[in-house]
Amino acid sequence: MSQYGPTPTPRPRPPGSPGPDPGPDHRNARIAIISLIVTSMLTVIGIVVSVVVADKDDPSDDGRGGGPTARPFQDDTATPSPDDTTPEPENTTPSPSPTPEVTTPAPAPDGTEDGEDGEDDGLTTAQRELRDSLNPAQWRRESCEPDTVPGAEASLRCTVTTQDPTYGALTTKASISVYGSKSEAQKVFRDYTAGLPDGNCDQQQNVRGVWSENGSDTPAGDAACYLNTTFQYVITCTYYDRPALFAVTGPDFPALNRWWHGLDPIFTD
């Protein structure tokens, strides 16, 4: 047979023998390593995402640095409500009292002036002088009030207390007036007592006579007692030495006469 003859058809080889089996231990170790790597990567990614999200949504960061605040979110351009504002400190300094308005008192009518104590007693200068001339032992000067008597320069009505031997203290209101002259006072007296007969008031009413002070025999002035139009008994008298007219009224003439007899000198000057 020659070297150049036809190429013989090769016969198929039998399949190769399989490679060596790595074994179950090697496969489990590789799977565990791969799982550990994947788990670690997922954990790192989760941490990064959580930090980014938390840093973005943290409401305690007001954008100006610093620590967290408890202030709720509000529009800085809006007027804060009372609950969102810090109350102003309470003003403990007392407010000054308003300064009283200073006014110059207008002159009182008919010459009325303030008394020596600075209080207005409602009396004119003439009335005050008359009050100060009265006997303070029986005339309560602080009780004196202006009385209106036509033609008089000054007239007062005051509380007067006298003493009776039987009945003790007797108190009533009496009037005293002063005029410009003694003749004026006498004219007023005659007008009041016109038509009354002469008599003694200790014995009867509606008469006119004279009177004296302290049991003196010298008359101090004219006197009269009568029932007036209002059904009040009146005892009135004048002075011969001063322009004064006295009068007292009451519903019970005996009691009024007892009071009259206990009257001390009216004037102290």
Image: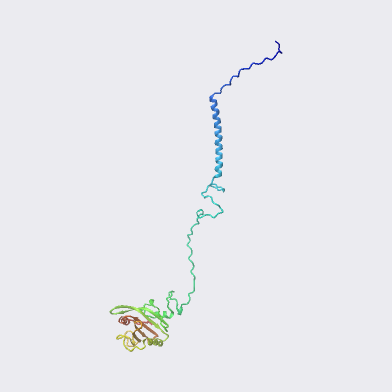
Counting labels gives: 0
Apparent side of residue 26 relative to residue 184 in the rendered image (left or right): right
Q: Nearer the viewer, residue 12 or 116?
A: 12
Asked whether the viewer can see residue 132, the reply is: no
Indicate whether 194 appears above or below 163: below
Residue with the most extreme top position: 1
For the point 55% across and 26% down, the residue is 27
Q: Nearer the viewer, residue 44 or 120?
A: 44
Q: Nearer the viewer, residue 76 or 128?
A: 76
Indicate whether 94 appears above or below 243: above
Image coords of residue 173 (percent x, y): 36, 79
Q: Quadrant of the C terminus?
A: bottom left
Q: Quadrant of the N terminus?
A: top right
Image coords of residue 75 (percent x, y): 55, 52
For the point 46% across and 78% down, the residue is 109
Image coords of residue 22 (percent x, y): 56, 23
Residue with the most extreme left position: 166
Q: Nearer the viewer, residue 18 or 169?
A: 18
Apparent side of residue 71 relative to residue 120 in the rendered image (left or right): right
Asked whether the viewer can see residue 53, the reply is: yes
Image coords of residue 70 (percent x, y): 51, 49
The colour style of the image is rainbow
